[in-house]
Amino acid sequence: MADLLQNQTNEKEKLQNLNNKELDQDELIKRQNSFLNTTLGKIVNTAIDLGLRWVLPDFFEDQVIDVKNSLIKGGLKEGIDKAIEGGIELGKSVTGIFTGKFDNISQAQNAIKNGGIIDSVSNVIDSALAFSTRKKLINANTANLIKQGKNVILDNVSSNIETEFVSQLDSIEKLGKYENNWRNYFQNQDFEGMEREYIKIKEKLKEIMPIETTIKQAREIENIHLIIKNNGQNFNLSEEQMQLAEAL
């Protein structure tokens, strides 16, 4: 009897902690910045790879790779990393995100638009080209071809950033659909349906920039889902469990 009462007390405390736990704001900002740095870095890198192939059509693949490596030696990678990091912070300042935290995807999209990343990437390419040419890592003719086609690279960066944010908004919409489906299955006590939507929710969250409201909603669903799953798919919830469920 004592063990049962202790288990009930532990469960009550655990549920209260889950329900009341606030997200660490500094950690959330770090996660958002990390997501944007990684995502935008991949976009810029891919645009440069495709752009080099386009502006150097007579080069073999290995030659294009050599040119890219020469630009990297000229500071391309480090320059892009700094351009993106600086662009994110400048965009926050320009658009009034003084807390450092984005509350939704549209805020992040607007900040990136106003962060001057495209201009910064342009300057980085120029700098890397100048260094690589000066050190004879790239000949002058190749450098001129890249300069002439630089706008193609920058246009690809711009359009692909826009595409990424459209994809983010689409993913948020799909996540909301999966969460609503999960709630409907929960109301009908259909655990198989809940499990299918729960898996979709977990997978979709991996694609989305961390947003506080999104994380909290998903966490509340996860708490109830795991309670029911760990209780042998039993929907007879305690009073504390029902309070958490009603928040959904």
Image (spheres, helix red, strand yellow):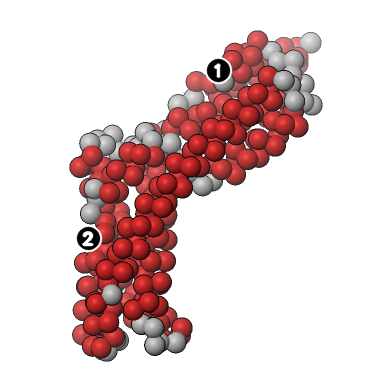
Q: Where in the figure is residue 108, as x and y percent of width and height?
A: 34, 42
Residue drawn at x 42%, y 80% is 65
Give the mark toward the camera: 2 or 1. 2
Q: In terms of image quadrants, where is residue 69?
A: bottom left
Q: Amino acid at mark 1?
A: Ala
- For image coordinates 50% across by 42% down, the residue present is 171
The residue depicted at 28 percent of the width and 78 percent of the height is 146
Q: Which mark is residue 119?
A: 2
Where does the image place residue 160, in percent across and percent down from the top left? 39, 57
Calculate the distance from the C-alpha at mark 2 to the C-alpha at mark 1: 46 Å
Name the side, left or right, on which 43 lies relative to 132.
right
Decide if residue 79 is in sight here: no
Residue behind mark 1: 247
Residue type at mark 2: give it: Asp
What residue lies at 27% left-to-right and 82% top-to-bottom? Answer: 145
Q: Earlier in the sequence, mark 2 or mark 1?
A: 2
The answer to whether one can see residue 113 in this image is yes
The C terminus, quarter of image? top right
193 vs 163: above or below: above
Q: Position of residue 207 (x, y in %)?
A: 51, 47
Foreground of the two, 4 or 192: 192
Q: What element does badge 2 sit on?
A: helix
Tell me, for residue 60, which label it has, or none. Answer: none
Q: Quadrant of the N terminus?
A: top right
Kindly state the secondary structure of the residue where label 1 is placed: loop
